[in-house]
Image (cartoon, rainbow, N blue to C red):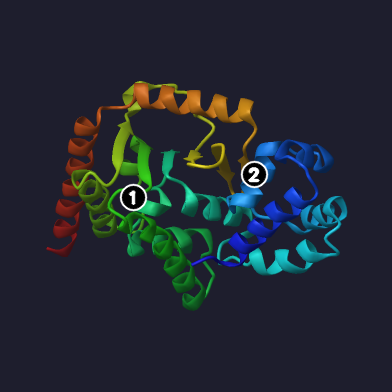
């Protein structure tokens, strides 16, 4: 079923074609790339208020996009991540490097809760529970047995930094291992022994589509940058390839993840004794 964002994107395509403009030509009027226009039409790129106003002016659509972009951009996610979450939901392939945390799509509820409490230690339970629910809703992307293809490279720090408690970590890492064993995700671990690597600055996500150019997303504290700039995406693809080359093989990685999970489980049993 099409949502508001899909319908607005479809209307943008119709308006552009009525104006006899290619995506590239419209992009030039808007000072963006033609692929950016294509992503707005496909729904992989949100139409923000300033862009909506420029579209109405360029296409003579009498305020249509300004009126409808607010409905289309309603999101449960933080503003800096909302566009990336929407793009993620439409991707046919996701490649991700995480330096400190289990990727959101692979998290368990208790792990996510511990992360959100660390971020917002004074937030009431209702807010934390809502954040966890939204994150778990994202994870339903993996309910489909084949799409999207998810390839995750995890720094060894993800395994070693205790989030929540030993029990929480044992469950979280066992969940990641189970997804890898079911071949629902390809998971590699970048070991400490690799030393300096290509993404010391932090996490990286690449997203690929059947009908639109790839996107890359860089996230920091309450900030995020989603881009389709070909040179930037190409550079990030090389970074990811270098990370994969330095990482353990999927089989070696699975053994390390399961070993770490078992260590946490033993620690939890020792605490209970």
The disc, 1 or 2, on the residue closer to the chain's N-terminal end is 2
Q: Which of the image's four quarters has the C terminus?
A: bottom left
Point out residue 83 in the picture as x, y percentages from the top left corner. Answer: 60, 53
- Taking the image as shown, residue 90 lies to the left or right of residue 230, namely left
* Residue 155 can be seen, yes or no: yes
Q: Nearer the viewer, residue 199 or 160?
A: 199
- Taking the image as shown, residue 237 lies to the left or right of residue 248, namely right
Point out residue 160 in the picture as x, y percentages from the top left corner. Answer: 31, 42
Q: Are marks 1 and 2 in contact (CB under 8 Å)?
A: no
Spatial separation of the CA atoms under disc 1 and disc 2: 42 Å
Q: Nearer the viewer, residue 70 or 236?
A: 70
- Taking the image as shown, residue 110 lies to the left or right of residue 69, namely left
Residue 229 versus residue 48 in the image, above or below: above
Seen at 51% across and 36% down, the residue is 202
Residue 68 versus residue 232 in the image, above or below: below
Check residue 162 in the rendering and tell me which mark sits there, or answer none: 1
Point out residue 56 in the picture as x, y percentages from the top left corner. Answer: 83, 57
Residue 156 versus residue 37 in the image, above or below: above
Seen at 24% across and 59% down, the residue is 167
Count of picture labels: 2
Instruction: Tell me the element at label 2.
Output: helix
Check residue 38 in the rendering and tell me which mark sits there, or answer none: 2
Instruction: Tell me the element at label 1.
Output: loop
Seen at 35% across and 49% down, the residue is 147
């Amino acid at each position: 079923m099409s949502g508001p964002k899909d319908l607005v994107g479809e209307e943008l395509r119709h308006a552009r074609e009525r104006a006899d403009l290619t995506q590239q030509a419209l992009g030039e009027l808007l000072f963006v790339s033609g692929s950016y226009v294509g992503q707005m039409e496909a729904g992989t790129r949100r139409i923000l208020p300033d862009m909506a106003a420029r579209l109405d002016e360029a296409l003579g659509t009498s305020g249509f996009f300004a009126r409808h972009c607010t409905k289309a951009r309603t999101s449960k996610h933080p503003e800096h991540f909302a566009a990336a979450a929407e793009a993620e939901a439409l991707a046919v392939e996701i490649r991700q490097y995480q330096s400190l945390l289990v990727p959101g799509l692979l998290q368990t509820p208790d792990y996510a809760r511990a992360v959100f409490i660390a971020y917002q230690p004074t937030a009431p339970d209702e807010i934390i529970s809502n954040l966890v629910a939204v994150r778990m809703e994202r994870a339903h992307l993996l309910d489909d047995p084949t799409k999207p293809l998810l390839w995750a490279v995890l720094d060894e720090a993800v395994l070693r930094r205790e989030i929540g408690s030993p029990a929480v970590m044992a469950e979280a890492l066992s969940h990641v291992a189970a997804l890898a064993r079911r071949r629902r995700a390809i998971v590699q671990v970048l070991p400490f022994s690799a030393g300096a690597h290509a993404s010391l600055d932090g996490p990286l996500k690449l997203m690929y589509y059947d009908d639109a150019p790839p996107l890359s997303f860089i996230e920091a504290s309450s900030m995020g940058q989603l881009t389709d700039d070909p040179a930037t995406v190409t550079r990030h693809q090389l970074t990811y390839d270098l990370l994969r080359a330095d990482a353990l093989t999927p089989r070696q990685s699975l053994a390390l993840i399961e070993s770490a999970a078992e260590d946490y489980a033993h620690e939890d049993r020792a605490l209970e004794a």
